[in-house]
Image (spheres, helix red, strand yellow):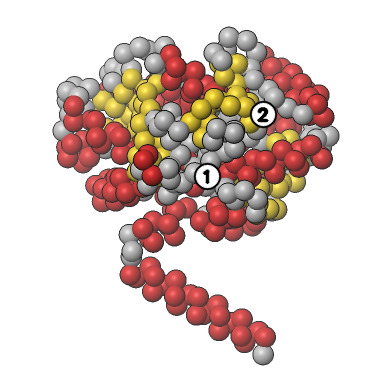
Amino acid sequence: MSKTGYYGNWGGAFVPEILHETFRKLGVAFIEAKADPDFWPRYVELMGSYSCRPTPLTFAENLSRRFGGAKIFIKREDLNHTGAHKANNVMGQGLLVQRMGKTRVIAETGAGQHGVATATMAAKFGFDCTIYMGEEDVQRQRPNVFWMEKLGATVVPVASGSRTLKDAINEAFRDWVANMDCTHYVMGTVCGPHPFPEMVAWFQKIIGDEARRQILAIHGKLPARIYACVGGGSNAVGIFQGFLADNGVELAGVEAGGKGLASGLHAARLAGSDASPGVAQGYKTMFLQDEDGQMLDTHSVAAGLDYIGVSPILVDLWEQGRVRFSAATDDEVMAALQLTIRSEGIIPALESAHAFVQAFKEVGDLPPEEAIIINQSGRGDKDIFTIADAFSDPSWREFIRNKGEEYADGARQESD
């Protein structure tokens, strides 16, 4: 960081005066935790005993044979507890909440994985929990909403704006202003005001640390490229950190191309041309916004990638030329997902499948003695409704129709 809270020209902490002291205390608590020699080992032990770390680095033998070129390895964050990389950051912040003596946590969520992870952490540590989620995402990710509620969290659908992730973030900040003495906001990605980007990145670096050790042990040398999907950017920043100092390792972020960059129905900030610098939600980054600074609507088949901004850490690395960006369309994502399922018996989340798209396009250009790593940030069972609909699966539609009729019959019997 060039100065506190900034990565080059990006980042900062643009927060209401009423939250200034809360952010100051959070920053102090985080600095103290980092300086505590017992904190990181305690965190690693917790992730090992509670969240199945280290997650495997899987050689995708069938896909490697299909495409030729470099060997394909998949970092399996889908095998983390709650099914995604989100647990890394959430459990770390849970330990920090304990240090600060707060009793309630709040969070925003898009795809629902961060919400489930936060609700899980709250249940384990005994915190009250409220999750804000856009109404559109509530409908797309109903299984995750179910589990959040069963874990004891209150899920608040957000009806304002585009009813997606950016609106959930706004509502979470409003809650924090009203309840800051007892409440900690568990930011889910490497965005927002300082110290959130630095803090989330610190916990997520466990991915890159593991992946580096694993590829050296399995392959005998560093990979040629690493691919990760990018919404806010926490899984990408997490794995990239293990290789940032290795200039021979190319780092590739893949954003949501939606219906195509020319359509306007996408969430490509750095791979497209529709984003511009701005300050919103407490920090400076590249946002999808109009000439008046009003945020544009976004689209992605993956609920976790339709955010209007992107991590200031990644914008800085993009400007330096250290990370390159591309975009994958919804159609490309579904094709890559189906191929991965059939070839390897692995079901990536729709978010993660974006990274697979770009890797599949490029892996054949590399020689067979090289390797690439795809960061599989989450598992796809959360997306079953979206995936089944996209595949127009007739048996699934029949199942849903029958279930709907059963529930309707039950409701009529209860009312009689």
Mark 1 belongs to which amino acid?
A: Asp
Left or right, 324 with respect to 93, comes to left
Give the CA distance from mark 1 to mark 2.
19 Å
**133, 244: nearer the viewer:** 133
**Which quadrant does the N terminus fall into?**
top right
> From where the camera sits, is residue 118 visible?
no
Badge 2 density bin: few <14, some 14–19, many ≥20, Cα 10 Å = some
Question: Which residue is label 1 attached to?
Answer: 297
The x and y percentages for residue 51 are 53, 38
Closer to the chain start, of discs 1 and 2, is: 2
Q: For residue 35, which quarter of the picture?
A: top right
Residue drawn at (64%, 40%) of the image: 169
The x and y percentages for residue 84 are 49, 41
Badge 1 density bin: few <14, some 14–19, many ≥20, Cα 10 Å = some
The x and y percentages for residue 312 are 54, 23
**330, 383: nearer the viewer:** 330
Question: Which residue is label 2 attached to?
Answer: 282
Mark 2 belongs to which amino acid?
A: Gly
Residue drawn at (49%, 47%) of the image: 303
Q: Secondary structure at mark 2?
A: loop
